[in-house]
Amino acid sequence: MRGPTRRALFATTAAGVGAALLPTSSAEAKPSPRPRAARACVSYRAGYHFTVPDQWKNDPQRPLWIDGEYHYYYLCNADYLDGGEVGTAWRLATSTDLVSFTDRGIAVPKDTTVNGDVWSGSAVVDTGNTAGFGAGSVIAVVTMSPGGGTDHQEQFLYYSTDGGRTFTDHGTDPVLASPGTGADFRDPKVIRDDDRDRWAMALAERDRIGFYHSADLKSWTYAGGFAKDGIGVLECPDLFRITADDGTRKWVLGASADGTGSGQPPTYAYWTGSFDGSSFTADSADPQWLDHGWDWYAAVTFEKRQADGSPDPRTRYALGWLNNWAYAHTTPTIDADGFNGTDSIVREITLRKSATSGYHLASRPLTALDSYVSRTVDLGDLTVDGTRLLDYTGVSYELTTDITWSQLTGAGVQLRRSPDGGRHIDAGVWGDYAFLNRRGTVNPDTSGDRQESRSPFDPSAGGVRLRILVDRTCVEMFVDDGRYVHSSEVFPYLVDDRLALFAAGGTAVFRNTVVREFAV
């Protein structure tokens, strides 16, 4: 996916001014004339979510396991705060546990060839030296737009011989040239097709995903495609195989898409099915969604490595960009901290078989997060009829609770509640849906169209388990077994740190209610 084409700062919007610079005193400050001048008294940087150290980030690139650590590449514009309108490079961060990261700087630079900056793509470790750069070389296939603009996109190759730290361009000619069919020809996702002993690529082509194959990563042949309309332009495709809980091995095809026009999420659509190297056959024509919130875009999945370094066939990792192109530049972190770019927590995904609806992916926050718990507040079992304010304050934490009832309209939590109770983020269940509602607090959607996200819920269950990750500028809610997740940006005032429970139409018991804080 391409980087930003225009830096539209948020300083004139009500959300931006109100949220960004709330000082410790009661009077609100005006935004500074230069975004680089961060205010020492305010920080909106996330406590335990990944953030770019400075400037701008958008699309994650699939992390690689190299020499005992994950190499996480992402699109970064180092000229963002100086008014640079275009131009992303690949920046690198490394981690052994995907919670704590070390910045390694730019790995794939921009503007080193006549083709300009580098967009989304994917990297692989070429253990068999198929490309000829040496066994173990790291090969990145990326989209670029020769001549500038966005209407001409081709795929180019960069290679690394130092373990993925720095990359060199493989000339200025594309390894997959534009077919001349239009602007949308991007985001190559390369995997090793072991069944056919070759490389395979999934490529975003507007309302379809094209499949290509190669023996050497430098020459690609078209094999087939998968088409889906009605959910917007398909971007950042994904293709992987995973073993389900019943032992069945399935292929999963995914893509980022904006389904809001048809009443669906603007996140990661996926299909389970089979892949024969040329075509993908879906179990169902309609996609499922890995996240039902407003801000989990350009997501990638990648291998979870076991203790011996081998891939776990039953579990993958996934992470997404916590933003939405409808308001991508509206964030208080620009003035407060001199950056714009936050990721979701890395989650573990598994494939499960339902007796009534086939296979689906389920998510949960990665278990490594447990190692960073700095404080645990056990609130126990709480009976609620109406609204109950809890004896806890915080802006960055995790809340878990099991809600049970015999007769109820809805129940949930009020997160980041203001001292007077007038502002809060609501999360829970209501009737036949689970929801996350950010309307009652400062948030990036000034249009008012993207305020509440919903996913199906069966009220006859008589209970629901909520696991909610709250940070300074985001909320991620995992419902029951994690089949449904809601991830959204929110920019509450930093004094909005209260927590309350609510129940409507009856009495609910919030059992095993626990708050955990993290030090990363």
Image (cartoon, rainbow, N blue to C red):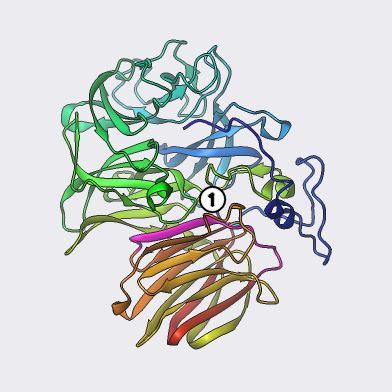
473 vs 79: above or below: below
- In the rendered structure, does residue 192 fall within the stretch colored magenta? no
Q: Is 81 above or below relative to 416? A: above
Percent coordinates x, y for residue 403 in the rendering: 41, 80
Q: Which residue is depicted at the point 25% across and 21% down?
A: 222
Q: Position of residue 34 (x, y in %)?
A: 79, 39
Identify the residue at image location x=26%, y=48%: 286
Near-viewer residue (517 or 186): 186
Please indicate whether residue 319 sits to the left or right of residue 216 in the image: right
The residue closer to the viewer here, 233 or 88, is: 233
Q: Residue at x 59, y 82 (%)?
A: 390
Across and down, in percent, residue 176 comes to 35, 17
Residue 517 picture quarter: bottom right
Residue 270 visible in rendering? yes
On the picture, is 246 further left or further right than 252? left
Residue 294 in the figure: left or right of residue 31: left
Residue span colored magenta? 482-497
Residue 492 drawn in magenta: yes
- The residue to which callout 1 is attached is 100
Rendered position, 155 above or below 75:
above
What secondary structure prevails in the magenta region?
A: loop
User: What residue is drawn where x is 29% and y is 48%?
Assistant: 287
Q: How many dots with numbers?
A: 1
- Element type where label 1 sits in the image: loop
Q: Given the image, on which type of amino acid does mark 1 rest?
A: Ser
Does the rendering let one see residue 200? no
How packed mark 1 is, by other alpha carbons closer than 10 Å (few <14, some 14-19, many 20 or more), is: some
Look at the image and tell me in which quarter the C terminus lies. bottom right
Residue 205 position in % (x across, y down):
35, 29
Residue sitting nearer the eye, 493 or 346: 493
Looking at the picture, does residue 176 appear above or below residue 261?
A: above
